[in-house]
Image (spheres, helix red, strand yellow):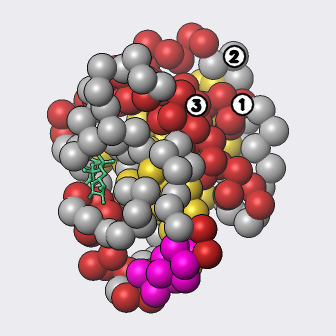
C-alpha cells in the first residue's frame, strides 16, 4: 500500500505521509512546542537536535520580548541547519477531557501557523501531529481537526501556499490520519483524492 495520501485542491495539495519531519525539505516546518518555548522531547527535541543551537538562540530573544507563547498560538524562527527556511513553534493544548477548549486550541495552532506561512509567502509547510504525544490528545480526534482545518484552508484563499504535508511518525498514526481524511473527503467540495 502506498505510504502517501494526497488530496488535490486545484493546483494545491494536502499530503499525508509517514516520516521524520526534520528531514523534509519544505519552506516551513511546524514544531509541537510548549508555552515556555524551552525545548523538550518528541518532535521538539528532534527539531532542536537537527536544527542546531541557532533556533534556541532566536527563541531566547522571543521569550525575552513576549514571555510565554499562549496555547493555541505559535511563533516563528529561522530553521538553523534544517532543510527549511522557517520553524513555526506551535503550542498545542494539553488534553484533559476535550471539554476545556482543547479542540478550538488545537485548530488555532494550525490556523496560526497557516497565517504565519501566508505572511512569509511560504509555498510548502509540514506539520507534525500536534498534541498527540506527550500532551495526550486522542489521535483520531486530533487527526480529524488537523485534516479538516488545513483542507478548508487549501480550499479557500491560501495565497502562495501550494503544499501542506501532515507528517505522522508511526504507521499506526498514519493509518488513523488516512481514515479521517477518507471520511472527511466528501466534505471538501474542491478536493479530489489520489
Ligand atoms: N517527525 C515527525 N513526528 C514526530 C517526530 C519526528 N521526528 N518525533 C516525534 N513525532 C511525533 C510523535 O510521534 C507524536 O505523534 O510528534 C507527535 C507529537 O508528539 P510530541 O512531540 O510529544 O508533542 P506534543 O504531544 O504536542 O507535546 C508537546 O512535548 O516535547 C515536548 O516540548 C514539548 O512540552 C512539549 C510537549
Is 120 rendered above or below residue 94?
Answer: below
Is 92 rendered above or below residue 79?
Answer: above
Main secondary-structure element of the magenta-colored stretch: helix
Depth check, front residue: 186 or 95: 95
**Residue 118 location, x and y as percent?**
74, 55
Kindly identify which residue carries mark 2.
189
- Name the residue located 42 percent from the left edge and 23 percent from the top edge: 100
Q: Are marks 3 and 2 in contact (CB under 8 Å)?
A: no
Callout 2 environment at 10 Å: few (<14), some (14 to 19), or many (20+)? few
Depth check, front residue: 60 or 2: 60
Q: Looking at the image, is mark 1 or mark 3 nearer the viewer?
A: 3
Q: CA distance from mark 1 to mark 2?
A: 8 Å
Q: CA distance from mark 1 to mark 3?
A: 10 Å
- Name the residue located 63 percent from the left edge and 48 percent from the top edge: 112
Kindly identify which residue carries mark 1.
155
Q: The N terminus appears in which quarter of the rendering?
A: top left
Marks 3 and 2, the one that precedes in the sequence? 3
- Name the residue located 48 percent from the left edge and 45 percent from the top edge: 71
Kindly identify which residue carries mark 3.
149
Amino acid at each position: 500500500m502506498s505510504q502517501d495520501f494526497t488530496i488535490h485542491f486545484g493546483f494545491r495539495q494536502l499530503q499525508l505521509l509517514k516520516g521524520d519531519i526534520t528531514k523534509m525539505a519544505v519552506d516551513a516546518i511546524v514544531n509541537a512546542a510548549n508555552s515556555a518555548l524551552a525545548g523538550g522531547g518528541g518532535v521538539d527535541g528532534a527539531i532542536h537536535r537537527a536544527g542546531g543551537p541557532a533556533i534556541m538562540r532566536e527563541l531566547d530573544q522571543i521569550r525575552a520580548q513576549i514571555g510565554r507563547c499562549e496555547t493555541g498560538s505559535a511563533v516563528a524562527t529561522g530553521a538553523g541547519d534544517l532543510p527549511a527556511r522557517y520553524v513555526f513553534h506551535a503550542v498545542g493544548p494539553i488534553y484533559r477531557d476535550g471539554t476545556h477548549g482543547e479542540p478550538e486550541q488545537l485548530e488555532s495552532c494550525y490556523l496560526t501557523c497557516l497565517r504565519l506561512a501566508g505572511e512569509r509567502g511560504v509555498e510548502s509547510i509540514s506539520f507534525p501531529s500536534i498534541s498527540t504525544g506527550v500532551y495526550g490528545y486522542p489521535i483520531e480526534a486530533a487527526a480529524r481537526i488537523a485534516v479538516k482545518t488545513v483542507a478548508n484552508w487549501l480550499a479557500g484563499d491560501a495565497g502562495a501556499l501550494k503544499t501542506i504535508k501532515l507528517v505522522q511518525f508511526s504507521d499506526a498514526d498514519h493509518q488513523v490520519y488516512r481514515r479521517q481524511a477518507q471520511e472527511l473527503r466528501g466534505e471538501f467540495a474542491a478536493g479530489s483524492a489520489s
